[in-house]
Image: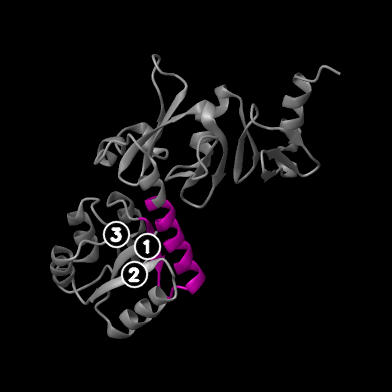
Amino acid sequence: MMLKCIAVDDEQLALDLLVDNVSQVPFLQLVGTARNAMEVLRLLQETPVDLVFLDIQMPGLSGMQLAASLKGKTGVIFLTAYDHYALESYNVHAIDYLVKPVPFDRFLEACMKALDLFKTRAATPGTIAGAAGTAGSGAGAGAGGGSMGGADDPRYLFVNVEYNIVKIAVDDVLMIEGYKDYVKIHLHSTKRPVITRMSMKHLEEKLAPFDFLRVHKSYIVSLQRVESIHKSFVKIGELEIPVSEHYKEMLMDRVNRNNIL
């Protein structure tokens, strides 16, 4: 999958560096550059793109105001010299927030996150377009933007994926991999994981009644899907999930409850 993108910065040196970084990422196709928000809007009218790499402090309309005006139609990755806009970036559903100077490995990580999100959106049928604003309200979203189904549908998890709400069968979940500000949900039915902005703690609490267990600060597993337990990891199919010493006792306690020997 190729992602069409625009690079935006009001400083030419910063823009040149951004263009150079984009050129090194094989799945990015740069279709234009801009020095201010109005140039971006003109470019978008001519050529819709998937992704905008966007500075925040620019003359006229700011990058944050521009992102809000896009209303989720285009993915946004912010690159800025200031860290105090990070919280506000969540409100405009930014894919990532990078503070300059940005090491290339961190830039690539943000691009990979964008690619994963677009792949997930393309591969996930039956999503509810434009519903991210609805899902973002209420206590559940404050903890990470996901909720369990109601009493009539208790074994489903509803999560925000990019700008949609996706329904996931709990029984389909193999394991969850946690990152700084999002989680990757691995499923039995597809090789492509579902990526959503949510805390591990929130998801751990929601899945606990369904025989899920945290085995590492970055991993939650479905005990029903665990095929074997080793000294420092568990296996689910071809996946080897590390088990940390901190969580090992809880894992073995659950195993011993079901040990018939």
Name the residue rendered at 20%, 55% in the picture: 70
Q: Secondary structure at mark 2?
A: strand
Residue 74 left/right relative to 217: left
- Kind of residue indicated by mark 3: Asp
Q: Position of residue 152 (x, y in %)?
A: 39, 14
Q: Position of residue 61 (x, y in %)?
A: 15, 67
- Kind of residue indicated by mark 1: Met
Q: Secondary structure at mark 3?
A: loop
Name the residue rendered at 30%, 54% in the picture: 88
Q: Give the numbered dot on residue 78.
A: none
Seen in the picture, residue 40 relative to 134 is either above or below; the reply is below
Judging by the rendered image, the residue that carries numbered circle 2 is 29
Earlier in the chain: of badge 1 and badge 2, it is 1
Earlier in the chain: of badge 3 and badge 2, it is 2
Say if mark 1 contacts mark 2, CB within 8 Å. yes
> Distance between the Cα atoms at labels 1 and 3?
9 Å
Q: Give the numbered dot on residue 2.
A: 1
Residue 207 left/right relative to 142: right
Residue 21 placement: quadrant: bottom left
Judging by the rendered image, the residue that carries numbered circle 3 is 50
Q: Secondary structure at mark 1?
A: loop
Q: Position of residue 15 (x, y in %)?
A: 31, 79
